[in-house]
Image (cartoon, rainbow, N blue to C red):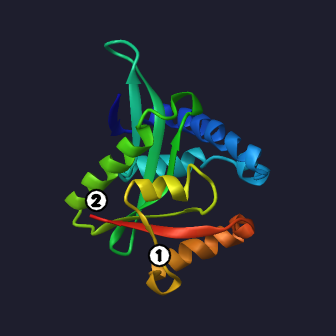
């Protein structure tokens, strides 16, 4: 597996990964999350063009690779903000999410950013508890930056506040 920039031809595959990665939420009574549409192709393309979209690709042949996971990120305040990181369930527990996040950390340091941030569900085992194991800490309300507050507002408008969510940060 290698981490590399996403290719335009792979963007529909990233949507498929997102749909598949959403399915486990159904078992937690979070069908609205499972049923949520993946990012539109136009949005994924804008991340790709901006150089903020990466895939973890498995080599199939010497000339062909297949994405197993992806990460898209924004710059928010002084941090690289993980907008989305998803791994195909068939490839889970292989360190793919961690590898994508570590790749983003190296990118962020090269951009002179000070941290990684994200928003996530508090009680979903593969969300906040997982990110804590990767060195993220939950931010208090007083620690939220203007950018993170704006993200949380948009998430609330999208209905994600039905379940407990937090903002997390990992210093670089």
Q: Which mark is residue 139?
A: 1
* Residue located at (40% from left, 15% from top): 60
Residue linked to disc 2:
108
Sequence-wise, the earlier of marks 1 and 2 is 2
- Asked whether the viewer can see residue 6, the reply is no
* Residue located at (46% from left, 30% from top): 67
43 lies above or below 137: above
Q: Is residue 45 left or right of residue 135?
A: right
* Residue located at (33% from left, 52% from top): 104
User: Residue furthest toward the bottom?
Assistant: 142
Q: Position of residue 44 (x, y in %)?
A: 51, 47
Report which quarter residue 13 is drawn in: top right
In this view, the residue in front, 60 or 124, is 124
Closest to the camera, between mark 1 and mark 2, is 1
Which class describes the residues within 10 Å of circle 1: few (<14), some (14-19), or many (20+)?
A: some
64 lies above or below 114: above
Q: Secondary structure at mark 1?
A: loop
120 lies above or below 153: above
- Asked whether the viewer can see residue 77, the reply is yes
Q: CA distance from mark 1 to mark 2?
A: 19 Å
Report which quarter residue 15 is drawn in: top right
Q: Is residue 148 left or right of residue 75?
A: right
Q: Position of residue 109 (x, y in %)?
A: 23, 60
């Amino acid at each position: 597996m290698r981490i590399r920039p996403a290719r335009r031809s792979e963007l529909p595959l990233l949507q498929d990964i997102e749909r598949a990665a959403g399915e486990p939420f159904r078992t937690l009574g979070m069908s609205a999350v499972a049923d949520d549409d993946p990012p539109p192709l136009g949005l994924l393309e804008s991340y790709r063009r901006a150089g903020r979209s990466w895939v973890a690709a498995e080599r199939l042949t010497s000339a062909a690779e297949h994405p197993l996971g992806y990460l898209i990120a924004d710059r928010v305040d002084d941090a690289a903000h993980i907008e989305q990181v998803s791994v195909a369930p068939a490839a889970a527990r292989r360190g793919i999410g961690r590898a994508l996040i570590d790749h983003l950390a190296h990118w962020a340091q090269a951009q002179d950013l000070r941290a990684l941030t994200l928003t996530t569900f508090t009680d979903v085992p593969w969300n906040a508890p997982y990110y804590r194991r990767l060195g993220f800490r939950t931010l208090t309300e007083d620690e939220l930056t203007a950018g993170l507050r704006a993200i949380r507002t948009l998430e609330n408008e999208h209905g994600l506040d039905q379940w407990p969510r937090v903002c997390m940060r990992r210093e670089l």
